[in-house]
Image (cartoon, rainbow, N blue to C red):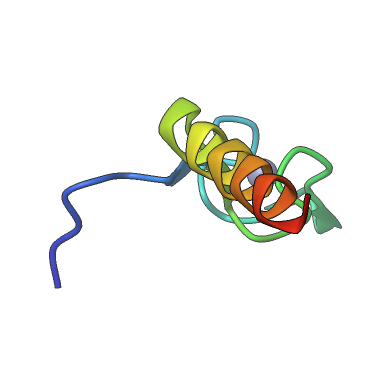
Amino acid sequence: MKKDLNMEKECAKCHGRGKINNTICAACNGTGTVLTEDGLKILKFLRDGIRTSES
Ligand SMILES: [Zn+2]
């Protein structure tokens, strides 16, 4: 499966492992991935969209 838009990228702190020295990585919460700028934009867009439709 190929994604055209990358919303997540490998965590630079733990290099995608989710843990640093057996401790859950604080930067990605142990997921091994963090949101990219595109991912943050999409989340913000979705939140704003929900807010707009509620008013
Ligand atoms: Zn991490």
Query: What residue lies at 81% left-to-right and 58% top-to-bottom?
Result: 22
Residue at x 55%, y 39% (from the top left corner): 45
Residue 11 seen in the figure: no
Could you say which quadrant of the image residue 9 lies in?
A: top left
Q: Position of residue 13 (x, y in %)?
A: 64, 32
Q: Splitting the image into 4 quarters, where does residue 19 fall?
A: bottom right
Residue at the farthest front position: 55
- Image vertical order of residue 37 relative to residue 8, above or below: above
Viewer-proximal residue among 51 and 47: 51
- Splitting the image into four quadrants, where does ligand 1 fall? top right
Q: Nearer the viewer, residue 2 or 31?
A: 2
Residue 30 visible at all: yes
Q: Judge whether 28 appears above or below 18 on screen.
A: above
Say whether residue 22 is left or right of residue 12: right
Q: Residue furthest bottom?
A: 1
The residue that appears at 66% across and 40% down in the rendered structure is 48
Which residue lies at the image location 32% right of the left edge and 44% below the top edge?
6
Q: Horizontal and vertical percent for residue 2?
A: 13, 63
**Quarter of the image where one finds residue 43:** top right
x, y percent for residue 44:
62, 37
Question: What is the count of numbered marks?
Answer: 0
| Screen quadrant of the N terminus | bottom left
Q: Is residue 25 left or right of residue 47?
A: right
Q: Residue furthest top?
A: 37
Q: Please state if 52 lies on the left or on the right of 23 as rendered.
A: left
Residue 35 against residue 31 in the figure, above or below: above
Q: Is residue 12 above or below residue 46?
A: above
Relative image position of residue 39 (x, y in whole percent): 48, 40
- For the residue pair 53 and 22, the one nearer the viewer reads as 53
